[in-house]
Image: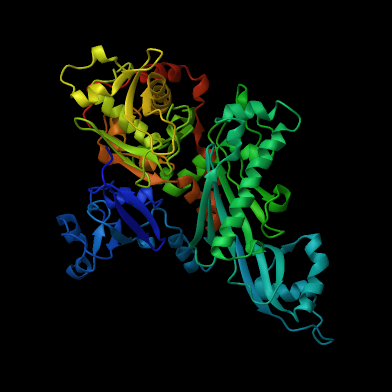
Amino acid sequence: MSDAQVRVTFQPIDRAVFVLPGTSILEAAGRAGLSIDTPCGGSGTCGKCRVQIMDGAGEPVQAEREVFSEAELNDGWRLACQTVIRQEEIIRVPESSLFADQHQILEESKTQKEGKILPAIRKVYVELSAPTLEDDVPDLLRLEQKVGKFEIDLLLLRQIGRKLRASDFKGTAVLSDHRLVDFELGDTSSQCYAIAFDVGTTTMVGSLLDLCSGHQLAITSRMNPQISFGDDVLSRIRHSGSCPDCLDDLRQAVVDAIVKMTNTLCAEAKIRCEHIYQIAVAGNTTMEHLLCGIDPTPLGQIPFVPTYARGLVIPARDMGIPINHRGTAYVFPVIGGFVGGDTVAGMLATQLANKNSPVLMVDIGTNGEIVLANNGQIWAASTAAGPAFEGARISCGMRATRGAIEKVALDGDVRYSVIGDVSPIGLCGSGLIDLAAELLKHGIVSSQGRLLPPEELPALLSPPLKRRVRLDHEGHCQFILAERGSGQVNSPIVLTQRDVRELQLASGAIRGGVTTLLKNAGLQTKDLQAVLIAGGFGSFIRRSNAQRIGLLPADIDRHRIHYVGNVSLSGAKWALLSTAARDEAEELARRTQHVELSTNVNFQTEFTEALIFPTNVTV
């Protein structure tokens, strides 16, 4: 049965989600795509996750009384980690409460008179005096007197004289670092935009930024169309070399998606594409190679060497991306074979290298990226977790979209919640983890991952749960989770033995990678002061259930596990809004020690052991 859900609307982004009563505001915000800053891990001690309930806020808890004044409490101010949803709510989330808030970076840049922390792109409106016999200063020197020294390419040099005279020497100089990229008629200084892209193996996200204010104007996401060529990076690497045009097919597929996302963002924000001057792209090593049309074949062969390491600055027109004709694309630096720019962007956004104690960051997805930082040293690895967490290769799996069962609990019978509060049509990754954890707790699945048949179920198991364990027409055991919604096929939504095996492989790969990095650093799980869960999917998993199946370390206090959201996208934003942040990304990539797990003997052992679900886990 599906529990009744309530609608929660977050302002000022005007985004609504449906959640079960009792869900924390912090978790509800995560489902709405908002990453709220919780440095204390949600314990209510830091006071960073401030939100305002617009009507009908309940009684504050003690932690909130210690943070807010009586007037603020009366105005509905609460801590997102301490307050739960009881009824339909409208909640305002100020920018200062958002994780890695980009506006804060831009505010800092405004105070830096020497321009140490500023976007690479700046626009300056100028009104120049026209040349005369008495004032015969050359055009470029005349412009430099207003905007500072710059370089210029030959094409623009051929046009600049005509542009200046057509505008009566009044217009807007567009500069990228110390290079003049355009001179526009009129005052367009307030029209300065950039787009940050997170290009994942399965999904893509784009964020349109106003470089003058630092605000996000629009955001969009879509499936990576390269999925049609294979749902993992190795499949796409193989496909890229299978025919003369295959690499270009893969490149064009993702470029077409970026073009559509760019047009969508511009339409939503009501801006012109030619006023976008930069994009930044963060993706894993394979995704970045394919986007640039660089042969990824060496990535699929020992020793898995990428073609480039440092970040790339490429004319957007050479990539076929419809922004300003002199705009550029910054492609993030990579660390190693399968540890790419998305990991570097995440390290940048979380400031991982600046932590004073051991910290682990895990991006859970088709490719699981793992980073460990301790005493100024950084180790990074990537493991092929497979697409199970995205709902692929699961019999009734689906992405976390409308109609997906995303939360499961067993309490005498099955309780679940469905995204969009509609009839269920499938099971997404977070629901898969919940279900597996509950089946383990109730003895329906063994620690070896065996889905027990009816005759072997625990004697004390409730009759409703026993009735959900059945054999299919081939005699294979399955657990009946729900009946499908109307308009779907008649077969129910089930968990099969094969589904459990897929989850074991995905979870074991992550867990084995974590253990391997810890051993490399001479650390144990108990030494970790924090575990950061990155990525869009990671924000939706329940910590205790992830620990129960061994996806996250079971022997660490769950309050040390923090959700940090899509830090790949956040890091890409930083790179657009701060040249200093871009330099930091380059430095992080070069100082990180890459651990290649596929050839690591310790990893093979750890992975094999991690295929068994933990026993005697209390979280």
Instruction: Decide: is 518 above or below 608.
Output: below
Q: Quadrant of residue 432?
A: top left
Query: For this view, does 77 lie left or right of residue 321?
Result: left
Residue that appears at 18% across and 55% down:
63
Query: For this view, does 433 lie left or right of residue 282?
Result: left
Of 498 and 331, which appears nearest the observer?
498
Q: Position of residue 161 (x, y in %)?
A: 81, 73
Q: Position of residue 121 (x, y in %)?
A: 61, 62
Quadrant of the drawing holding the C terminus:
top left
Q: Position of residue 43 (x, y in %)?
A: 23, 48
Residue that appears at 68% across and 55% down:
322
Instruction: Decide: is 303 above or below 577.
Output: above
Visible in this render: residue 223? yes
Instruction: Decide: is 548 above or below 167.
Output: above
Query: For this view, does 283 lie left or right of residue 349?
Result: right
Of 234 and 305, which appears nearest the observer?
234
Residue that appears at 36% across and 41% down:
423
Quadrant of the drawing holding the N terminus:
top left
Query: For this view, does 293 lie left or right of residue 433?
Result: right
Q: Position of residue 241 (x, y in %)?
A: 70, 27
The image's colouring method is rainbow
